[in-house]
């Protein structure tokens, strides 16, 4: 390896946003280097995809590979979301959504899913260096230079005409360039693991994520994401203070303790067996002061991360890659590009729509909409489209005027 190398695009991180952006840019003929600090496959949280993802995966010709490998990799077909609150069940069917586009997707093991995307980018021509970690960023007139450290702690520099930060919670450029800004959401934590679920209830629908509201605390909720091999990802989310009584306990004890508190989950998961280490993550909601600079843009979680509740993370990550790739292509061809108008604003519009419904979930308004017993078919289709990830479809009135529409709907449901 020479001391100084030059690429058209250097991508930090080979997660979903980095892998998709790399695929799309090599398809346009650019030399792309991906620097990934871990070895793949590696664990990542965030297993429930939304159907909107499939449209972005199609841009990188990945849908066929996903369908083909799904069964072998334990990926579970997914067509909606089920909800449970204090003895009451309801479900949203994504195939009956308002917006055009795919209505089904998968619940994926992220270690395998992320590897599938990264391998695809590599096959299409991106160079990926695993266990190479980006340490610093220096902006220059004609691009940016990154200081990189490999697994043997050898440091070297590499130059990109443009840099895409797809480092997820690593948030490399927000930290290095002081772009971090606080999230509007309070500090929340999640405890989670993979289980052999051993669910015997024949009415349990493995084709849907199950979201359960804690029987006493509306701001505490659980996810149950079944896979096709009899395993499942299970987790609980609450404000960090709710876990403080358990501060000396192991993550698996905390998770099990909360699972026992909901009667339905306790019954469904009576035979569960923990098959992986239980983990926790805290303070994951984050924001930035800008999504781009002279020679960089932030993708996926390296930009903003809202909240896990509606599984919007990977969808937003893939949307950011799909939006940025054609703009970087134009930029590299020396065409003027307005990143504010064509990247930050459109990306933010969908994120803001999700934000409305996430806020409404925690303050209880959106929960009351979801659990309202006399659903209106047309309204449900519009809500279903948002939960399926179509948060950029402004033909949907609940996207175009999300705040006002949610407020009115919640009021109707409550009265
Ligand atoms: P990542 O997938 O995080 O990839 C970033 C990559 O960058 C990593 O591989 C990392 O190793 C690498 N990296 C970091 N630092 C460096 C460095 N210095 N140098 C080189 N490489 C580096 N989303 C969903 O869609 N569905 C869900 O069900 C869901 N559940 C979630 C549950 C919880 C509790 C949380 C916290 C999040 C959840 N998410 C979910 C969100 C989802 O995990 C993320 O939004 C998604 O992984 C973001 O993808 P990304 O490409 O931006 O980053």
Image: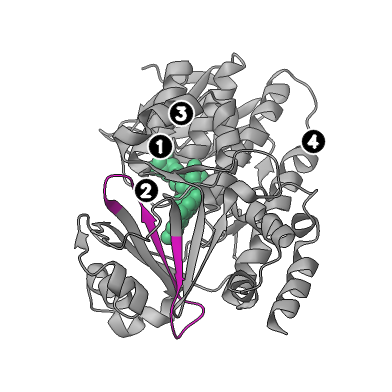
Q: Secondary structure at mark 2?
A: loop
Cβ of mark 1 under 8 A from ligand 1: yes
Give percent across and percent down for residue 318. 57, 39
Which dot, 3 or 2, sits closer to the camera?
Answer: 2
- For numbered disc 4, what is the local secondary structure? loop
> Closer to the observer: label 1 or label 4?
1
Q: Is mark 2 within 8 Å of ligand 1?
A: yes
For the image, the number of numbered tags is: 4
**Residue that label 4 marks:** 338
Q: Which residue is mark 3?
A: 34
| Quadrant, the N terminus | top left
Disc 2 designates what residue? 44
Do callouts 2 and 1 mark residues in contact (Cβ within 8 Å)?
Answer: yes
Residue underneath mark 1: 114
Q: Tell me which numbered mark, 4 or 2, is placed earlier along the sequence.
A: 2
Q: CA distance from mark 3 to mark 2?
A: 18 Å
- Looking at the picture, the colour scheme in use is one colour
Magenta segment range? Answer: 210-231
């Amino acid at each position: 390896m020479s001391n100084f190398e030059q690429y058209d695009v250097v991508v930090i991180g080979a997660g979903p946003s980095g892998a998709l952006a790399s695929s799309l840019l090599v398809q346009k003929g650019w030399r792309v280097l991906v620097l990934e600090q871990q070895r793949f496959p590696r664990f990542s949280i965030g297993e429930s995809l939304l159907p909107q993802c499939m449209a972005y995966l199609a841009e990188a010709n990945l849908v066929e590979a996903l369908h083909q490998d799904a069964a072998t990799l334990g990926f579970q077909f997914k067509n909606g979301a089920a909800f449970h609150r204090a003895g009451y069940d309801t479900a949203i069917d994504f195939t009956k959504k308002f917006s055009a586009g795919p209505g089904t997707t998968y619940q994926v093991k992220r270690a395998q899913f992320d590897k599938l995307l990264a391998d695809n980018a590599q096959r299409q021509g991106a160079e990926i260096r695993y266990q190479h970690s980006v340490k610093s960023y220096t902006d220059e007139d004609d691009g940016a230079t990154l200081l990189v450290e490999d697994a043997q702690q050898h440091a070297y520099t590499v130059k990109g005409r443009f840099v895409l930060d797809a480092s997820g919670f690593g948030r490399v450029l927000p930290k290095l360039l002081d772009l971090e800004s606080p999230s509007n959401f309070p500090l929340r934590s999640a405890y989670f693991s993979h289980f052999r679920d051993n669910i015997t209830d024949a009415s349990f629908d493995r084709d849907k994520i199950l979201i359960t509201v804690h029987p006493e605390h509306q701001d505490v909720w659980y996810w149950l994401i079944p896979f096709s091999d009899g395993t499942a990802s299970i987790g609980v989310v609450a404000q960090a203070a709710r876990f403080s009584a358990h501060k000396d306990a192991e993550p698996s004890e905390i998770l099990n303790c909360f699972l026992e508190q909901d009667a339905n989950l306790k019954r469904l998961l009576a035979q569960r067996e923990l098959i992986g280490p239980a983990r926790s993550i805290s303070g994951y909601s984050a924001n930035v002061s800008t999504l781009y600079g002279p020679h960089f843009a932030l993708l996926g979680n390296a930009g903003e991360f809202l909240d896990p509740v509606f599984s919007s993370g990977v969808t937003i990550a893939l949307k950011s890659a799909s939006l940025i790739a054609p703009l970087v292509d134009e930029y590299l061809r020396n065409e003027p590009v307005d990143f504010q108008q064509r990247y930050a604003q459109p990306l933010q519009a969908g994120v803001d729509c999700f934000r409305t419904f996430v806020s409404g979930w925690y303050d209880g308004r959106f929960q009351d909409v979801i659990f309202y017993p006399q659903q209106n078919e047309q309204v449900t289709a519009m809500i279903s489209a948002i939960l399926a990830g179509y948060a950029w479809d402004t033909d949907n009135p609940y996207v175009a005027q999300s705040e006002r529409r949610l407020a009115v709907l919640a009021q109707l449901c409550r009265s």
